[in-house]
Amino acid sequence: MKPIIWIATSLGVTALLAGCGPKPSATPPHGKANVAYAGSLAEVNDQVIGPNFSQATGYQYLGQGGGSFGMAQKLASHTINANVFESVGYAPIQILEPKLTRWAVSFASSPLVIAFNPKSRYGPELTAIQHGKKPLKDLFRLMQSPGFRLGRTNPGTDPQGQAFYMMVELAQKHFHLPPDTTEKVLGAPDNPHQVYSEEGILTLLQSGSLDAASAFLSEAQQRHLDYIPLPRTLNFADPSENAWYHQASVKTPSGVVHGSALTIDITTVGKVTPAAQSFIHFVLGPRGRALMQKAGYTTFPAHLYGTRSAVPKKIRAELS
Amino acid sequence: MNRIVTGIGTLVLVLLFLPLAVLVAHAGSLTAALSSAENRMALYTTLTSGILALAVDMLLGVPLSWFLSRRLSPGWQRFWGTCLIIPMLMPPLVLGLVLAYLAGPASPVMLTNTFLGLVVAEVYESLPFFVFAAWGYLRTIPRSLEEDAWALGKTPRETFRYVLWPLAATGFAVAGAMAWARIVGAFGGPIVVAYHPSALPVQIWIILQEQGLPAALGLALWLMVAVLPLPVWLNWRYGRAER
Amino acid sequence: MLSVNVKSPHVTGQATFAPGMVALVGLSGAGKTSLFRLIAGLDIGGDVTVHGQSLASRHPWERPIRYVPQRPSLVPHKTIGSQVTWVQRMDNAVLKEWISLLALEPLWHRLPRELSGGEQQRAALIRALATDPEILLLDEALSAVDRPHRLAIWDALKGLWPRDRLLIFSTHDWTDAETWADTITYLEAGRLHAPQTARNVTPLTAQMARLMGFLGAIPLTPNQWLWLHPASLGVGAWPEAPCILPGRASVTALTPLSARYTLHIQGRTFRWTGPPRETGPQDDRVSIFQPVITPFGEENRE
């Protein structure tokens, strides 16, 4: 197919001109970690991990973000170029298997919270719940109020959207709420009155179009939002609670999804380059963990998914 | 010199149509793209909201461009011409973020995630382009055509209908085609304020994440097929008025 | 019928016009178009009255005045027939007559861009006539029409133009003005001079005299000037009308750069020296002089 050759050639030329060819150079310190990451990791990667990694190892860092599934699809179809992929949840990485990778390591998570706008009609009650003056249980009644404007992301495309949906299911169980609670709070998984894009949802919350919205703790901290923290049993951040999370499920266009901790999973993409290996090594190491924790993430001992033998040597050392 | 121009022209034409060739080559099955109810709905949403947005563009843009080109002194025209560039330069995503405030509590009706909100986002993305294009065209209609008709005893109203409208219609058609392209491609605004009901660009974005690139490109091809007839018709119908 | 008292950057002066055909004579840039635009109401500056009523508050389309500009003024995207019908108020039969007089039948269904310059001017004229105007302003409206057509059209206008209506046409050609107009009014450098009867016009300025075909003037007395014309000589004093006198002239070369002129008139003989003539000797006609040869007298009226 001729056009494709053209594109490939022009891409190659552009890359040469820009001096950033995808091939790493022979001398390691001049390579580049080209990291594709889930949109919610933009701030911590570009502002914190990236610069520190470059300083510590001498490798360059380049990041690009987007929805986890979207990034995975683009990596799989080679429309974007990266040698490291950092996703929320293991599911997006499975899209790359087995061609581009056969393993992933989960090492951190960002607890799910409910961000809210204190100036909203429900601000006082939400604030009371935030400060523990009212029980968390009340939140699920409050969210059923007829005029309550709740925002969440699309379970079809966003792991956070799935987790939020299942969180309400688990809360119903946990607090022994009436069986129609989930239905009343959320409606259908793709309820058009609640589902917004990841790009827009927190802006809408800040602008006052929403009373409350699903968010990761890290996002809420970065944006200085008011938020209601959730216990381990509801925040989808603790892999040791996976059995409990698994009891909830949500139906998406691509099938039924069962709950599991929303871990941050990292892997290499395609040929493993020294820079890519070094980046993952840095993130999993003590320095990386400390930086992640500072940014609102919970870290835990690295946990391997997939084929152990496929993991590059340097990284395998980090696995307990 | 002529050869160089011809050469560059040909090359650019090829480059311009390259994306379309890639789209056709890589799009998944067209029928598969339409087999999902969501995709059909998105197509329907795009067409209905788009036609509504285009109608609003015309309703607001025709008087405004007329006012700018006919009722303002050249100095003010230059001033507003420069000012009009500002909304045109606003990146669509930024527009979306700003619209979040306008569509939120400030608005008398809640617009976020409503059909109306989608139309508003599409209008904001396209209206400056409509006005700019229409105004640029209207400015080229000589003032003397009106005066000549007045001097024959025809009122401004009669003059508008008989003399100016047929000429201006070409400009409005061109501007309408341009606005339509912006409307159906509107993404930055809708992704923030109107994720639902999803118009095609947002739906393509969703499909890309759910099902991958070939499915998304298949739907993108439908976007092209569905939105092409209107500008083609406008061009054919009004693009030939004698000057 | 029509009085104008204008004061604008481009033209000033006042004049009153009686019904009939009026020629507005002036060189290019004299302000003819400016004056017409003021009368038509397209520009403002001064007062225009018709039958004693001021038109100041009336828009162009509310005035009993129709105006055909010099530049092409047809609606570009409509056929000639369509636009004539659009403005038509004239009786159909009369219009038909005009159409055939102007030889416009074959052009009826054509667009302006398919017409030559002269054809476009003919079409613009019929469009204005079709409005059945009380006052019609033609701004060099037939300048591009070929000579046979032009003469026919003027003939027809002269014959058919209603006695109680006013037609003002502008021209820079004195012969046209003299031939077709009842009244001539002169415009120079934005100054509008009072109308004069076409048959008996006194040149008011040197430029007007030149335009009228006079070759020069010779002072007879401090207040009297002899006007030299190819066809006649005029004796007169400003501002009185001249009398036209027949005479004989002769010229003798003195040096390559000068010649002696002799003029016999009413038993008197005038002699003067000037630049040599350029044409062959035709001693009985003054027409051998080139307009530039003879200097005009002192123009203390300017």
Image (tube, rainbow, N blue to C red):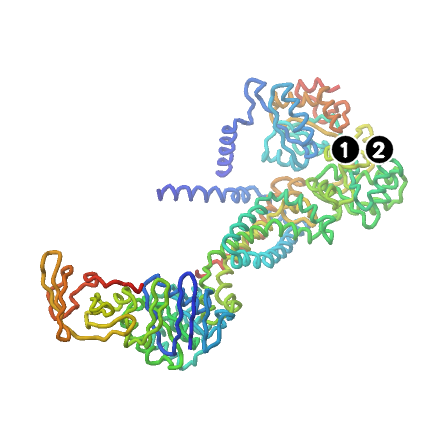
Q: Amino acid at mark 2?
A: Pro
Q: Is residue A74 left or right of residue A16?
A: right
Q: Residue at x 48, y 56 (%)?
A: B139
Find disc 1 in the rendering and name its residue: A217
Q: Residue at x 82, y 28 (%)?
A: A240
Q: Are marks 1 and 2 on the same chain?
A: yes
Q: Is residue A313 left or right of residue C288?
A: right
Q: Earlier in the sequence, mark 1 or mark 2?
A: 1
Query: Circle 2 marks a residue in which chain?
Result: A
Q: Residue at x 71, y 25 (%)?
A: A105
Q: Nearer the viewer, residue B33 or A129?
A: A129
Label 1 element class: helix
Residue C233, percent across and down? 20, 72
Q: Nearer the viewer, residue B209 or A311?
A: B209
Q: Quadrant of residue A132?
A: top right
Q: Nearer the viewer, residue C256 or B47?
A: C256
Residue B224, percent across and down? 57, 49
Q: Which mark is residue A231?
A: 2
* Neighbours of disc 1 within 10 Å: few (<14), some (14-19), many (20+): many
Q: Report the number of discs.
A: 2
Q: CA distance from mark 1 to mark 2?
A: 12 Å
Residue C141 at least partly seen:
no
Q: Quadrant of residue A85?
A: top right
